[in-house]
Image (spheres, rainbow, N blue to C red):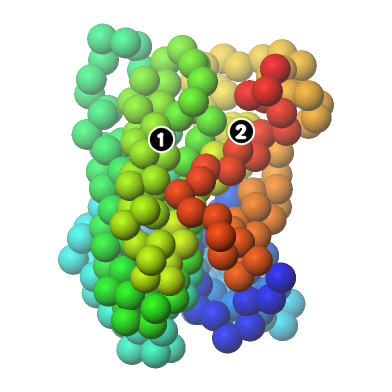
């Protein structure tokens, strides 16, 4: 897989899965735009990429602000002249009782509207280029039942549906839109949710046929394939990367 001369934007990239995706895309030759809520940690990821011989820039980007999204995408287009790849990775996860609806708006803003705003902002550029790859980071929570993840599961299910809807509409214009649904991946999000749910990691491991928690690199490898030209005939799919959790 070769992403030389491609420009890739990754959201929520200051740590965790987004950081792993940024490093992988840069390793494959892409110029990576590392974005997140705060710029300083993004600049550290950029430095990590540059030290390894890659090319990257950092931008502050809150995906819930449509105006900020439009502005950053316009700046990236101005700087590089193209936007080839968008990875909608930014996300939050909340836990709540079934009768608690206080967190749903925030989840919808980040996990669903964020994907829509960023995709809508890059699509005109990709349509003009007749080339583009979008990968949305969903979750196996969009498929399976987990207590107290009501808002998050609903949002990630929506991301899977949105991926199919948009993919069918834009595939004929040279744009591939797909998703990756991670299982349990070792990041600050998993640590926080694990604590909130009182998750017993040894039990979680027993539910994973691969008998290990996933890494950001596991997800980055799947994303790298989906944004490559080798995945040209893959449209609207959600690739589950969960060590086998959902096949049991
Ligand atoms: N870690 C897991 O086990 C797991 C499993 C399934 C899916 N996911 C998904 O993978 C993606 C990355 O998660 P992670 O585990 O790396 O989590 P994380 O919390 O470590 O990282 C998420 C990043 O998103 C950023 N973010 C949050 N709100 C944002 C906003 N409004 N605008 C821009 N950035 C914002 C955060 O600042 C953070 O850097 C998320 O979409 C998450 O739902 C994670």
Q: Residue visible at 42% across and 39% down?
A: 160
Is residue 52 depicted above or below 238 in this figure?
Answer: below
Residue 221, horizontal then vertical, whole percent: 69, 56
Dot 1, crowdedness within 10 Å: few (<14), some or many (≥20)?
many
Q: Are marks 2 and 1 in contact (CB under 8 Å)?
A: no
Residue lying at the far left in this picture: please name it: 67
Is residue 117 depicted above or below 109 in this figure?
Answer: below
| CA gap, disc 2 and disc 1 | 12 Å
Residue that label 1 marks: 156
Left or right position of 83 against 103 = right
Is residue 104 depicted above or below 145 in this figure?
Answer: below
Left or right position of 76 against 85 = left
The residue carrying mark 1 has its beta carbon less than 8 Å from ligand 1: yes
Residue that label 2 marks: 183
In depth, the one of 214 and 236 nearer the eye is 236
Tell me the element at label 1.
Answer: helix
* Quarter occupied by residue 67: bottom left
Answer with mark 2 or mark 1, whichever residue precedes in sequence: 1
The residue carrying mark 2 has its beta carbon less than 8 Å from ligand 1: yes
Q: Residue visible at 46% across and 12% down?
A: 147
């Amino acid at each position: 897989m070769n992403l030389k001369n491609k420009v890739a934007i990754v959201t929520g990239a200051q740590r965790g899965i987004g950081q792993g995706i940024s490093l992988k895309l840069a390793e494959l030759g892409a110029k990576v735009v590392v974005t997140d809520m705060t710029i300083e940690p993004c600049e550290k990821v950029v430095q990590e990429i540059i030290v390894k011989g890659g090319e990257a820039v950092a931008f502050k980007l809150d995906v819930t602000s449509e105006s900020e999204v439009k502005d950053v995408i316009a700046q990236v287009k101005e700087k590089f002249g193209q936007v080839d790849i968008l990875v909608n990775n930014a996300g939050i996860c909340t836990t709540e009782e079934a009768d608690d609806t206080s967190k749903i708006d925030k989840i919808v803003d980040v996990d669903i509207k964020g994907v829509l705003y960023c995709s809508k902002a890059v699509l005109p550029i990709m349509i003009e280029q007749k080339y583009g790859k979008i990968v949305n980071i969903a979750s196996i929570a969009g498929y399976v039942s987990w207590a107290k993840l009501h808002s998050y599961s609903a949002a990630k299910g929506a991301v899977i549906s949105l991926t199919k809807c948009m993919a069918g509409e834009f595939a004929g214009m040279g744009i591939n839109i797909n998703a990756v649904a991670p299982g349990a991946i070792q990041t600050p999000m998993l640590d926080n949710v694990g604590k909130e749910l009182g998750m017993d990691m040894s039990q979680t491991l027993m539910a994973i046929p691969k008998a290990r928690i996933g890494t950001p690199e596991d997800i980055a490898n799947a994303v790298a394939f989906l944004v490559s030209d080798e995945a040209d005939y893959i449209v609207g799919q959600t690739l589950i990367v969960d060590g086998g959790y959902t096949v049991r």
